[in-house]
Image (cartoon, rainbow, N blue to C red):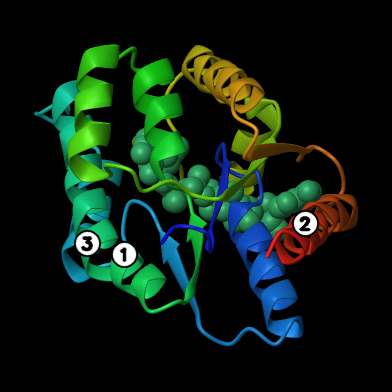
Amino acid sequence: MTNKFIVIEGLEGAGKTTACNTVINILHQKGIKDIVSTREPGGTQLAEEIRKLVKKKFKKDKLNYIAEVLMLYAARVQLVNNIIKPALLRGAWVVADRHELSSQAYQGGGRCIDDRLMQLLHDIVLGNLNPELTIYLDLPPIIGLERARRRGSLDRIEQESLDFFERIRARYLTLAKKDKSIFTVNAAESLPKVTSAISFILQSWLHQKEQSQ
Ligand code: Z5A
């Protein structure tokens, strides 16, 4: 069920939204029409409401990190069951702007949430649903935050310390090293270079997929 599931990952300002559009354009050029694009947290009516809560800074009620991870998985379980799984089951492609790797990096790496809770949430919410291809856009957090800052005011998570984002990046890199389905792109390069790296990875992957069928 999962072999048409592509995920784009990375820190803020890494260029994920731009990369998702590149992937979708390449799939369109291949004649693929049934493509569902998602973003996390979000992508369903309820999950979009959770997204607003996750990004909001409450003056008198600091968001507990366990509450944060539970909210993210609550949004994910809605998206997975109501959008992603039905799309994959009918044979559509799914192109996702963030998925579970974000939780592993931000909540597991950044917030230092216990591995046992992360594993439990993974098992309950995703079971054996795995993306076939993940493109991780790697860049130093200082560059990504600067890009995000240029776009407007920073949300609750974006206002965290540089240390927090360095831990997230380190976790992304560790996870990418261990998993052959994750391809790392240097997102500090210029936009045309990043786009051409993504295009190369995707075209090679699609070619290999066609050969093995
Ligand atoms: N979060 C979490 O903690 N745990 C989870 O499990 C999940 C999420 C799923 C989602 O926020 C927040 O939730 C995020 C992690 C957390 N919080 N933080 N911090 P979001 O979706 O609003 O934000 P984002 O995911 O970080 O996306 P973004 O800031 O919109 O960045 P982006 O999509 O990666 O980049 P972009 O919009 O394509 O590009 C940003 C700008 O940079 C834009 O002006 C581009 O033209 C420019 N850009 C892009 N690439 C380049 C290059 N190569 N050179 C120069 N300029 C570039």
Disc 1 marks which amino acid? Lys
Residue 81: numbered disc: 3
Of residues 62 and 98, the one nearer the viewer is 98
Disc 2 marks which amino acid? Gln
Of residues 173 and 3, the one nearer the viewer is 3
Q: Position of residue 16 (x, y in %)?
A: 60, 52
- From the viewer's perspective, tell me whether residue 39 is left or right of residue 120: right
Residue 114: numbered disc: none
Q: Position of residue 26 (x, y in %)?
A: 74, 73
Using the numbered discs, state the Cα–Cα distance from disc 2 to disc 3 in whole angstroms: 29 Å
Using the numbered discs, state the Cα–Cα distance from disc 2 to disc 1 in whole angstroms: 24 Å
Q: Earlier in the sequence, mark 2 or mark 3?
A: 3
Image-quadrant location for residue 115: top left
Image-quadrant location for residue 156: top left
Q: Position of residue 167 (x, y in %)?
A: 51, 14
Image-quadrant location for residue 155: top left
**For numbered disc 2, what is the local secondary structure?**
helix
Residue 50 in view (yes/no): yes
**For numbered disc 1, what is the local secondary structure?**
helix
Residue at 78% x, 54% y is 198
| 159 is higher (above) or lower (below) than 13 | above
Residue 208: numbered disc: 2
Residue 85: numbered disc: 1
Residue at 19% x, 58% y is 78
Q: Nearer the viewer, mark 2 or mark 3?
A: 2
Using the numbered discs, state the Cα–Cα distance from disc 1 to disc 3 in whole angstroms: 6 Å
